Amino acid sequence: MNVKRTLKLLLAAAVVASPAAWAEYPDKPITLIVPWAAGGGTDATARIIASALEQELGQTINVVNRTGGSGVVGHTAIANARPDGYTLGLATVELDMMHWQGLTSLTYQDFTPIGQINFDSASLSVGEDSPFKDLEDFVAQVKSHPAGTYTASGTGLGGIWHVALNGFLMDQGIAAGKLTWIPSQGSAPAMTELASGSIDVVASSLPEARAMIEAGEIRSLGVMTPERLSGFPDIPTFHEQLGSDFSLGAWRGVVGPKGLDEAVVQRLETALKTAYDSDAYQNFMAKQGYGVVWRDADGFATLMAKDDAKFGEIMKQMGLAH
């Protein structure tokens, strides 16, 4: 009797674990964890993609903000979730940075990539009356003056824009850290300081600089993209001005915990691509000025691996890697 009962249990388990059992996925609401606060750009992106995904999956998607630890708390919650497809997350570029700073042991390898839906390249802005005429002049002045002569801001110490700026300096043969970094709680307060003349340059995405540029209080020296951005056609690229192919920026993408079933990944990847292509998502991102870039699960995995190595090298030169 015990043998028969054991066989029945094993057969039942096999049926539950079989690919056919995933055919009905999803059959209940899904949670989408956001590692950043409500009201910010990542939160807004998560909510619009969640709304579009609901139409494709036929289930409610509940967006939950899990903040703290410079992104560590939320990303940890995603990684520690059951790999059943009912807890996902909107991972951000900080995932490739936090472990280098010793904030967590988590890396991109602790997640199952589903698809990248956004990329905002770094740009450099200066005050309207800045002595830097253009990007070439900026590089020349930084090279010819002692370390600490100029100040920069845009995010906290070791944040994405801090690393992007120093990566570009290294690309131009300038030692990381030659500009004194003034930590800020984001681009908005940094832009205010820039307009007042308290700092010399701000690294940020162009959408974050848009309002001040349109108000005539600051101007952009360029953006780290191969081609000009459609939302900012008058702003030249770094490549145009210097021939530099260095590129770095902030990305967002949907992930699950490690070990997510391949059938679930395929279902989510297909639905996410349709949601990404939807008018609702594309129009929202265009209105906000956010960059839209699609990479499927494999492409997203490749990006995360490459960026992880790139961030590590730059942050080591900056003295921020542990």
Image (cartoon, helix red, strand yellow):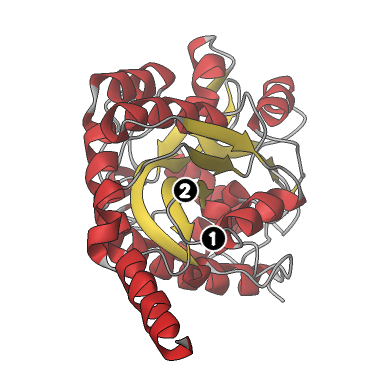
Q: Is residue 320 visible?
A: yes
Image quarter where the N terminus lies is bottom left
Dot 2: few (<14), some (14–19), or many (≥20) neighbours within 10 Å? Answer: some
Instruction: State how far apart marks 1 and 2 are (Cα).
Output: 8 Å
Secondary structure under tag 2 reads loop
Q: Is residue 180 left or right of residue 142?
A: right
At which x and y percent is residue 175? 61, 67
* Label 1 element class: loop
Q: Which residue is mark 1?
A: 82
Which residue in the protein does label 2 denote?
86
Which quarter of the figure is the C terminus placed in?
bottom right
Which amino acid type is shown beneath numbered disc 2? Tyr
Residue plotted at (54% across, 74% down): 313
The residue furthest front is 1
Amino acid type at circle 1 is: Arg
Q: Is residue 101 left or right of residue 30?
A: right
Residue 207, percent from left and from top:
47, 26
Q: Residue at x 44, y 54 (%)?
A: 255
Q: With respect to residue 54, does 153 lie above or below?
A: below
Q: Residue at position x 30%, y 26% from top?
A: 55
Q: Are marks 1 and 2 in contact (CB under 8 Å)?
A: yes
The foreground one among 271 and 7 is 7
Residue 228, placed above or below residue 257: above
In this rendering, is residue 196 above or below 42?
above
Q: Looking at the image, which is closer to me, 241 or 213?
A: 213
